[in-house]
Each structure stands twice: as C-alpha cells, then as structure tokens.
C-alpha cells in the first residue's frame, strides 16, 4: 500500500522560491530521483505559462489549416479543434500525480507496469516517440529559420541550413539541460511575447477570414463523421503525446491543490491550442495553408515578417525544450545510468541527426509524420491507463518506494512486470489498431465505411481492462492489490 505518513512541510520561503540547487542559473541536480518535501517550491498557477508557451507552435497552424483542407467548413473545423483540445484535461489530470509522488511520470508509471515492464514502456512511449516529435518540431522551426536568414540576405545553402538546425537545437537543449527552474523562469516572458505577436497575427487573419466558407462539395453523412473524427484525432494527438505532465509539477509541494494543478495545466495548453489551430483553420478559408508560413506572410506587413518568423521559432523551442526534458528522464528510466543533463544532450543529438537526414537527404520525415498519426493508437491507451491508476489509488503514491528498483520493491509485481497493466495496454492498443483509418484501414474502420474509432476505442478499452485486471492475481500482488 502507498505510504500515508506525512512528510515535513516546507517553510514559507521554501514554498515561494526554488532551493539553491534548483535555481535557474544552475543545472538541475535531480533526475528521476524523488524530490524531498524540503526541496519543493512554486505554486500551481505557474504551470499555466509552462504549457501556454509550448502551445504556440508552427505545427498547430499546420494542423488547423489541414482540417479545412480535409473538407470541413470553418465551423466544423473549429468544433473539431475545440473538442480535440479538450483532451488537455486528461494531461492536466496526469499532472496531479507529480506533487503526490515527488517523482516524474517516467517513474510513477512503475506502478502501472512494474519496474522492468516500465523500462519497455519508457523506451517506446517515452524516449522513441519524444525524439520523433522533437525532430518534427525542429524541422518545422528550421523551415521558419531558413526563411529568416533569407530575409536577412543570407542564402540558405546546405551549410547554412545545417547551422540553423544546430543553432535552434542548442538553444532548445540549453533550456532542457538547465532544467525545471529555468523553464519556470523563462516561460512566463516567452508566453507574454508570443501572445503579443500572435494577437497581431490574429487581427490580420480575422480580417481575411471567410466565416461563410464551405467546400465546393460539402461532406455529408458517414463521410462527414469520418472526417470530423479524423480531425478530432489529429488535434487530440497533441495532448495525448504528453503522458509526462507530472515531470513539470513534481517540484510543487505535496499539499498543492490537485484541482489547481489539473486546471492550470489544462488551461495553459488548451487556450493556445484552440487559438493557434483556430487561426490556421480561419486562414485556410482564403489562403493556401499547404504552406502556412508563406500564406500568412502574404497578409502581414513586410516589417512584421521577421517578428512572425522569430515567434514561430521561439514557440517551437519552448515546446521542444519540454519534450527534450522528458525524453532525458525517459532515457534514465529505461535503465541507462547517465546524468539527466547528459541524457538530454543524447536525445538532442538523435533528434538533430533525424532532422538533418529528413531535410537534406530524403523525405524520411514524411514517413515519420505518417507514423506519428498512428501514435494515438499507443498513446491513447497509455494515457488512459495512467489516469485509471491515479483514480484507483486516489492519487496516493509513495515516491521513495517508486524509486526502489530491487526485487523487494512493492512495484516489482511478477518478475518485475505488472501484467495487469501490460495486458490492459495490449488490449487497448489492439482495439485501437483494429479501428484506425490513417496510414492503413483497420477491419473495424472498414466495416464502418472508413470511420476511425481508434481514439475512443483505446481510451475506453484500456482503462476498463486495467481496473478489472488489477482486482485479479495479475495485479493483486502489487500495492493496490494488497490495499
């Protein structure tokens, strides 16, 4: 059973300010280890700017415009954007486990899959997918960076492109290496700066929006529902990719309000997610959003173009710094004995290599993009199992016990694997894969005339299986089973 012993409470100064070892000018000392209560600091409302700064991305514009290009009218596209972004509530719900455990998501999920099973989970859903997302975002930021150097009169030769990619990666990884305190310090001013820039962009977009827009051949019946569900899934893939939200809340005092942690996390990501994707959709009613950067530059004043490009790069740096930070923790949780700061650099090197290969050698990134459309098949079940575990345990986690990787660990389960979690994940992924209609069409989607139910299938099947199996011998040897 999770420990219910009270931990020492921080003083007023400890709650308000970072300890000396975690100030923004120092490289973060902690990795996947437990954060003692005496080293906790901050307030839940600070999570708003962390997630808001990371929500203003070039890919959000692309996805918003894509919904209209898929055949939706403006109001259908905006509805899909709002519904898809509501999944940030699930991201916020996972974040409440951070203060409770004083540990990152990559460690908390040992309760779900066992010590050994969680290493596999982190290798796939943690490290591999994070690096792919890092590469996608880096490629998007690099595109804006290439346009910026061209605007400055510098020809974007291959050498210049390599330099731009590396420069953006270095800025991103610097934030990630310095870690949590640096993120907390920088993201409020970044949020304010991006808000100002995109407010100006919004004015220009609204002036050019056709609010009566409808495609030449409007979608109806089954076809309309298929595209709407595909659009919601595309938007929801963003919040579903952040099963690691506890990474950024774990320094909060254990007594922090769970409702506040959930609310500020979800709101911080939801607002920019809706607004930026919404701008992409509105712009697509009159502009060719197959190339959002060029399309939007055509309606902005010439002097504002470099400001807009810098904002695109800055927003992507903000989201990638969070991604690289979590990927570094995932690499540690896989079992590789490496300092968190070094693991972040390894992640960045892998992402830079993937990005350069994609941009300069082949169209490999297109393949990665298609694969990431399928990540909802894995991430939907993964996130819903995590949420079910929080609910089952009533968000009571023993942080020090979670860090124990020995055979005596209460989270060793059967041979280091919680088969209840593993089977629930396998069942949810199977149900989702059978229902998908993206890169391929699953048999369930085919029977439903192309309607893609991968998202709801995974979100429903996995937690139901998990709750049932945790009451059986498969999960009964763990802390929950003995409770």
Image (cartoon, rainbow, N blue to C red):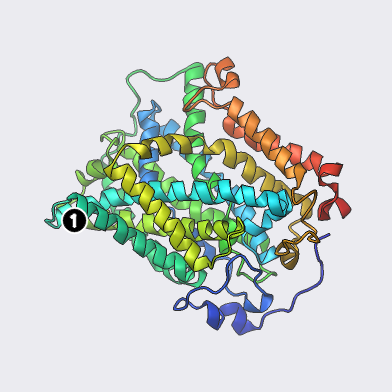
**Can the viewer see residue 13?**
yes
Return the residue nearer the eye: 391 or 443: 443
Q: In this picture, is 159 found above or below 431?
A: below
Q: Quadrant of residue 303?
A: bottom left
Q: Position of residue 465 (x, y in %)?
A: 75, 37
Q: Position of residue 299 (x, y in %)?
A: 21, 44
Q: Is residue 392 left or right of residue 266?
A: right
Q: Position of residue 56 (x, y in %)?
A: 39, 53
Considering every residue shown, the one lying at the far left of the view is: 153
Q: Residue at x 48, y 74 (%)?
A: 27
Q: In this picture, is 45 found above or below 204?
A: below
Q: How many marks?
A: 1
**Can the viewer see residue 390?**
no
Q: Quadrant of residue 53?
A: bottom left
Q: Position of residue 358 (x, y in %)?
A: 33, 43
Q: In this picture, is 86 found above or below 253?
A: above
Return the residue nearer the eye: 414 or 315: 414
Quadrant where the N terminus is found in the figure? bottom right
Q: Secondary structure at mark 1?
A: helix
Q: Which residue is mark 1?
A: 149
Return the residue nearer the eye: 151 or 368: 368
Q: Is residue 8 left or right of residue 65?
A: right
Q: In this picture, is 422 found above or below 215?
A: below
Q: Residue at x 67, y 59 (%)?
A: 97
Quadrant where the C terminus is found in the figure? bottom right
Considering every residue shown, the one lying at the far right of the view is: 482
Return the residue nearer the eye: 388 or 334: 334
């Amino acid at each position: 059973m999770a420990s219910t012993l009270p931990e020492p409470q921080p003083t007023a100064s400890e709650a308000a300010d970072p300890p000396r070892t975690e100030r923004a000018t120092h490289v973060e000392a902690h990795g996947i280890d437990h954060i003692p209560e005496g080293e906790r600091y901050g307030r839940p409302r600070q999570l708003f700017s962390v997630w808001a700064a990371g929500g203003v991305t070039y890919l959000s514009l692309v996805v918003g415009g894509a919904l209209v290009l898929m055949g939706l009218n403006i109001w259908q596209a905006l509805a899909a954007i709002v519904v898809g972004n509501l999944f940030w509530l699930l991201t916020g719900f996972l974040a409440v486990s951070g203060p409770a455990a004083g540990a990152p998501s990559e460690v908390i999920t040992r309760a779900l899959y066992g010590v050994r099973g969680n290493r596999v989970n982190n290798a796939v859903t943690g490290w591999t997918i994070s690096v792919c997302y890092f590469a996608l975002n880096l490629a998007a930021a690099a595109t804006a960076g290439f346009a910026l150097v061209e605007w400055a009169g510098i020809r974007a030769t291959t050498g210049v492109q390599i330099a731009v990619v590396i420069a953006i990666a270095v800025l991103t990884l610097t934030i990630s290496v310095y870690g949590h305190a640096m993120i907390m310090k920088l993201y409020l001013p970044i949020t304010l700066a991006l808000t100002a820039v995109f407010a100006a962009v919004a004015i220009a977009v609204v002036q050019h929006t056709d609010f009566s827009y409808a495609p030449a051949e409007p979608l109806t019946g089954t076809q309309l529902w298929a595209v709407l569900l595909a659009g919601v899934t595309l938007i929801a893939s963003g919040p579903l990719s952040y099963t690691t939200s506890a990474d950024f809340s774990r320094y909060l005092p254990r007594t922090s309000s769970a409702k506040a942690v959930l609310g500020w996390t979800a709101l911080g990501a939801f607002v920019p997610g809706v607004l930026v994707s919404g701008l992409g959709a509105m712009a697509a009613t009159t502009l060719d959003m197959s190339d959002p950067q060029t399309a939007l530059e055509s309606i902005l004043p010439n002097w504002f173009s470099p400001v807009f490009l810098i904002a695109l790069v800055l927003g992507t740096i903000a989201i990638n710094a969070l991604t690289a930070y979590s990927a570094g923790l995932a690499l540690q949780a896989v079992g590789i004995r490496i300092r968190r700061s070094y693991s972040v650099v390894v992640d960045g090197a892998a992402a830079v290599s993937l990005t350069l290969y994609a941009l300069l050698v082949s169209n490999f990134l297109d393949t990665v993009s298609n694969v990431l459309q399928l990540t909802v098949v894995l991430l939907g079940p993964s996130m819903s199992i995590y949420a079910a575990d929080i609910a089952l345990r009533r968000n009571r986690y023993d942080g020090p016990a979670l860090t124990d990787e020995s055979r005596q660990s209460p989270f060793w389960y059967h041979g280091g694997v919680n088969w209840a979690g593993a089977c629930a994940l396998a069942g949810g992924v199977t149900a989702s894969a059978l229902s998908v209609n993206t890169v391929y069409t699953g048999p369930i989607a085919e029977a439903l005339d192309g309607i893609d139910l991968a998202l709801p299938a995974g979100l429903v099947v996995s937690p139901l299986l998990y709750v049932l199996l945790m009451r059986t011998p498969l999960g009964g040897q763990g802390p929950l089973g003995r409770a």
